[in-house]
Amino acid sequence: MAPRKKDKYVVYAAGYTRDETHGLRIYDYDSEKGRISFREKIEISNPSYISVSHNGKLLYSITDDGVHAYRIGEDGSLSYLNRSGIHGMRGCYISTDYEDKFLFVAGYHDGKVTVLSLKPDGSINKICEEIYHKGFGSVGERNFMPHIDCVKMTRDNKYLCATDVGMDHVRVYKLDHKSGKLTLADIIRSEIDSAPHQIKFSLDGKFAYVIHEMKNIIDVYSYADDNGTPNFEKIQTVSTVNDYHAGNSAAYAIQISTDGKHVFCSNAGDNSVSAFDRDEKTGMLTRLFTLPISGDFPKDIAVSDDDRFLLSINNESSTISFFRIDLKAKTLVMNGPMEKFHSGNCIIIHKVV
């Protein structure tokens, strides 16, 4: 019998360019060792976030002049398709709906949600919707205006959730799948001065996890669509840090494991990563550990499909650090030397399809 074909993975990493010109890099990923080897760099300015389409065939990136689209090759290589402006300031988060028909951009600087339609080949078509959040937050020196940090669809592909760190809430918009227009359907209100940063949904779509920068917490919500009305109910709040954490800590990235049994998050300032057991029936989280990542400002993390390895891209130390995960022993052990990466923002382990 022929040996089973080994799955191939690549790592995409993006960071601010500043005095460089190539903000996006491609690495070959060794899934047995949890290490990367440099392959290629892509010329692009200040990609603050990247995202792979749900069909695994396209990569989209934020850039200074809007958004760029790339086709992913059979070996994980990237071929430039096209770009589009977004009629606003540079975005900070990008994602697609679950049919890969629309592209969503979050605007931190101008508090704007932008929806762009996608062509059948994955290239960017045109702007369908532009919504500016309005209002004033509670903390003058930081939350004086709307700052949208994340735009993510519910798993049933009905509603777009936009986290607003400036206004301490998540706006839930119903998506018109023909026009790309958004209609406000609900507002999930977080604690005052908590700063909801990102939202992720469980694989079955029944639970939402909102990580909050300023209060270093994850709020867990049950979710259901009740006859065209989104219903979010908070069922748990857990801390992302230890009691003795650094005073300037800010909870940042959040990831759900491929099998849905664990949740991981990063804490900037505290410069740590936390892992949680996740009860698949109740959605509840139990923290396993919070341990250091040997870098400064872990802006994003990537976890391997088998939960054996974790990669942390550290913005202020300009490094990628590597770890072996042992969830049973509740440990995180450094897995070889760090890789230099200038002002990293986002990192993805991608299984080539």
Image (cartoon, rainbow, N blue to C red):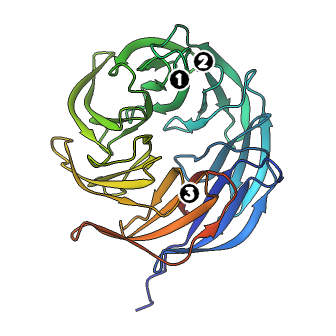
Among the 4 quarters of the image, the one containing residue 22? bottom right
Q: Is residue 352 visible?
A: no
Q: Please state if 229 lies on the left or on the right of 305 as rendered.
A: left
Q: Farthest top residue?
A: 135
Earlier residue among tags 3 and 2:
2
Other residues around mark 1 within 10 Å, as few (<14) / some (14–19) / many (≥20): some
- For marks 3 and 2, give the one nearer the viewer: 3
Q: Secondary structure at mark 1?
A: loop
Q: Secondary structure at mark 2?
A: loop
Q: Secondary structure at mark 3?
A: strand
Q: Amino acid at mark 3?
A: Ile
Q: Say the numbered circle drawn on residue 313.
A: 3
Q: Amino acid at mark 2?
A: Ser
Q: Identify residue for label 2.
A: 179
Q: Farthest left residue?
A: 282
Q: Identify residue for label 1.
A: 177
- For marks 1 and 3, give the one nearer the viewer: 3
Disc 3/disc 2 C-alpha distance (Å): 37 Å
Q: Is residue 266 visible?
A: yes
Front residue of 47/32: it is 47
